[in-house]
Image: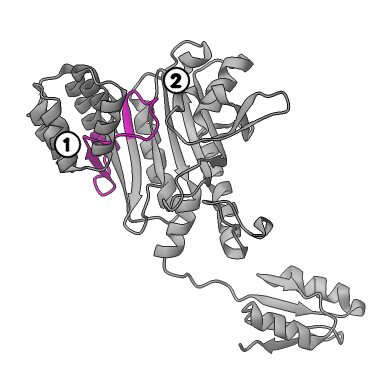
Amino acid sequence: MKWNRNLPIGTRDKLFKEAASAYDMEHQVNRLFHARGYQRIETPVIEFDDVFSAINDMNLYRFFDKKGRLTVLRPDMTSPIGRVISTTGVTPPLKLCYSGKVFRANEELSGERNEMTQAGIEIIGFASIKAEIECITNAIGILKQLGIADFQIEIGHAAIYQAIVQTLGLQEKDEEAFRQALQNKSLFGIRSFVASHPSAMDAFILALPRLFGSVDTIQEARDLTDNVVILEALAQMETIVQVVDAPEHLSVDIGLVQELHYYTGAIFRGYADMSAVHFLSGGRYDSLFAQFGEDNWPAVGLALNLDEIVSLKRRTLKTKKIDEKVFIHYSLETKQLAEEVLARTPNASLSFFDELSESIAYAQKWQFSKLIDVSNNTILELEVTS
């Protein structure tokens, strides 16, 4: 098998229009972040393994450097930013933005990408719920700017899951079983869990797989528990939904659990009808910076999976009418004339073929609508037919 002709699992090439769309989108998103007062930060693709000690459940691409130290391809951008703050002397509060590649070694045949282009923001040093509201408001505005109309952002709260785990005293194996059942919204799995872990929280836990939807779901959840931590979390969720005030794009999921374990407060994910996976995620993570020896700076982050958003646009948006593409054929003697025509013709490009027949064949292959021939020092327009 010649591996140099194949790609690693979960990676893919982007060609032509898709590559251009992805490039343009990344720059557009960064411009929108900058317009809201965020400062750009860039971190290396390769980090030491210890940087991601808070993500001990994620499949990482690990390898040793020449000194035998364990390094990884970064699986997310939040932990490296924590490392930057702990090593550079930059002091919060901060409003940061980023974009770049992240890598996750997902299971083969899972359908998930192992290489993704991610863009996002980190709001560090602000304890106010205004930080969560800013992330979600920002996300809604960006998705609309990108032309994504039919999307939903689900609001949850990490403290709800954590309160259940702590109240029941779940150990690692039992917690993982509970997490999986909750993430899958498995009624059977939750019933089996409750049967083996009976508690005063049974009614609330049994309802979790169906406690999602409109903001009214929050009151339904309140009626099922008297846990102070959970009630406070529900109140925060309600405040976020009310202040953002975008009922067409917001819903709640009381049993929402993020893949990463470092979240401590409100969490959120974005979905669309034509997308099989979530393309937006984030939340509050007030305890992450402690792993770097820093104070527990309050922080909230938002991450966008740009590759999935590009694919979503290609699947859902109607093809817009674009300006006709023009191909300009010229001779060496008429190079200056060709440049003049190029400068005043939108969506045009020069041909590098010597023969007119070759330029015509290329224009047909790549669906140019018009060919302009200036090779005889005159301007001759030719319609291109497939």
Kind of element beneath mark 2: helix
Which quadrant would residue 205 be assigned to in this image? top left
Q: In this rendering, is residue 27 above or below 261?
A: below
Which numbered disc flags the more N-terminal residue, 1 or 2?
Answer: 1
Q: In this rendering, is residue 104 above or below 5?
A: above
Which residue type does callout 1 highlight?
Ile
User: Is residue 364 highlighted in magenta?
Assistant: no
Of the 4 image quadrants, the one containing the C terminus is: bottom right
- State the extent of the magenta-drawn residues as a range: 241-267
Q: Position of residue 92 (x, y in %)?
A: 51, 17
Q: Position of residue 244 (x, y in %)?
A: 29, 37
Of the 4 image quadrants, the one containing the N terminus is: bottom right
How far apart are the alpha carbons under marks 1 and 2?
29 Å
Which quadrant would residue 125 be assigned to in this image? top left
Q: Position of residue 331 (x, y in %)?
A: 87, 80
Which residue type does callout 2 highlight?
Leu
- The residue lying at 45 percent from left, 34 percent from top is 58
**Residue at the extreme front:** 1
Colouring convention used in this rendered image of the protein? one colour
Residue for badge 1? 190
Residue for badge 2? 288
